[in-house]
Image (tube, coloured by chain):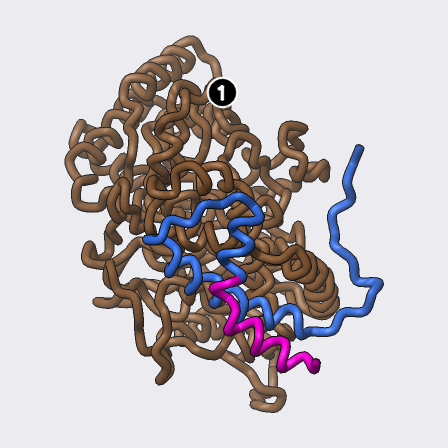
Amino acid sequence: MNADERRCFLDKADAVATAAAVKCGKVTATEAVSAALERIAVKDKAFNCFTAITASSALAAAENIDNSIANNQDPGPLAGVPFAVKNLFDIAGITTLAGSKINADNPPATQDAAVVARLKQAGAVLVGTLNMDEYAYGFVTENSHYGPTRNPRDTARIAGGSSGGSAAAVAADFVPFTLGSDTNGSIRVPAALCGVFGFKPTYGRLSRAGAYLFSGSLDCVGPFGRSLRDIALLYDILQGPDSRDPVCTRRPPELCSPQLNQGIEGLRIAVADGYFATGTQPEAMDAVEIVAQALTNVLDCGKNTEKTTNPPKIGGLATVSIPESDRARAAAFIITACEGGNLHLDNLRSRPQDFDPATRDRFLAGTLIPATWYLQAQRFRQWYRDRIREIFQHTDIILAPATPIAAPEIGVEKMVIAGQEILVRPNLGLFTQPLSFIGLPVLCVPVQRPGALPLGVQIIGAPYSEAVILRVAAVLESQGIISAESI
Amino acid sequence: MNADVVWDGLMTNIEEYVDRTAELINLPLDPEHRPGVVVNFERIAAIARLVTEFPLPPEVEVAPVFEP
């Protein structure tokens, strides 16, 4: 490839392709990282994804990788791949902002967050940190200190949140992958609104050590990417016990990449009805139907399946009812408000004026919640988890919309959906919140629409069934039903 | 008193609850922030009702097992 061809390749290549090209000498790690830094320098003003760029350390790391390769050493499966992370992850030498002005006063972190360290060990090169809603308390990434992050698909619109910078940086082709966090939907909502892949694994599956917490009962970390094979590779690299995170599972890793193309024969897949099929713009359920129909066609292939509408079906798949999901969302809300308020209580007492106005009064109110409400919500969590466990006895995968609407315009507070005027911000998490409440693994997959904004579909599995989720998504990707490329 | 009357009483006393509880936990409320806090607590209270009105048998307990 000549220089222009290499640049074109690097602008669009996913992590797997980039690392392969670096390792076989088609491009250097320095080229790959420089190209990313240049894309960011030229175009990030339009989107405001980044709050810090780590150019000199990135170029030094890239040079080390090129030297390793020159010495016939293997730098790892992500050799030379540029990446960025939500600014709540500790990066040695950088102050962890967590989207706030208050944390900017803190000294720099002394070591990388666990997941960042694992990615660097695999040869990936950190190029910067990404914008988010303050202290992760939002679904929009409209940050009063650092500005809103704009959706690369339409810059008048939000990128979603709280990991808005992470989703937008992938959608804008700045880097092939990023890291974010998800408490009630903060990976899945921005992935859906920006039209990229976003993965929230099982609660406790990935180490949160060195990630600034929000609600310890619910917080997860996970990757954004532009291809399934990247998501699978990243997830495989990031798995593994970590004594620094008390919630991190000691369950041994289960590698997904080797299983990715095993297909979906025999899988029992259903579409969530009731709560998860109500209160959406029609296109949100259309996206679910498109995914469901594609899977039906694969599952039915070669069989003489009688087409019947009894029992009810969506896109040819049976439906499943997850009871009391409105209460699940309410309970997740109470737990979040309580734990978040408690975490920030000292600063809420001494410097409330330094909080983002969008989070401050919510955090303040959360500090006042009676203990019995919080405990009841935690008890209800067992009840709801037991109902879901029963459902997963006879179902392997559940589909649901990621958000009720495509990306709204920045600053919009209310919308009319299904004939009702609702507040936009809290309702973006309508369908994500009940699922993270009980720690289920969920992959948000992008459904692109010609001349219109993308939408996301949640592929939901039983705890620790990430490999099954990714296999289902791989089938959809191979058919072009889901893709991070806009059309 | 039946539960409905108690509930209605609480809803009209949210402002007082916010003021008294903030005082109890030594949380000074800036007069500029107080209306937003009251509105948000009203929202929380309405949402909490969805949880608290759902009967749970006593054997359904909070999950985490503390490891000493």
Q: Residue at x 60, y 71 (%)?
A: B49
- Which of A28 and B48 lies nearest the eye of the viewer? B48
Determine if the magenta segment contains residue B50: no
- Residue B36, relative to residue B50: is it above or below? above
Residue at the top extreme, as displayed: A71
**The N terminus of chain A, quarter of image:** top left
Magenta region:
B1-16
Q: Disc 1: which chain?
A: A
Q: Residue at x 43, y 75 (%)?
A: A285
Q: Quadrant of residue A109?
A: top left
Q: Can residue B35 be seen here?
A: yes
Please, what secondary structure does the residue beneath circle 1 have? Answer: loop
- Residue A12, relative to residue B56: is it above or below? above
Q: Which chain is brown?
A: A
Residue A365 x %, y %: 48, 55
- Which of A88 and A356 lies nearest the eye of the viewer? A356
Q: Residue at x 34, y 38 (%)?
A: A130
Q: Which chain is blue?
A: B
- Which of A364 and A231 lies nearest the eye of the viewer? A364
Residue at numbered disc 1: A111
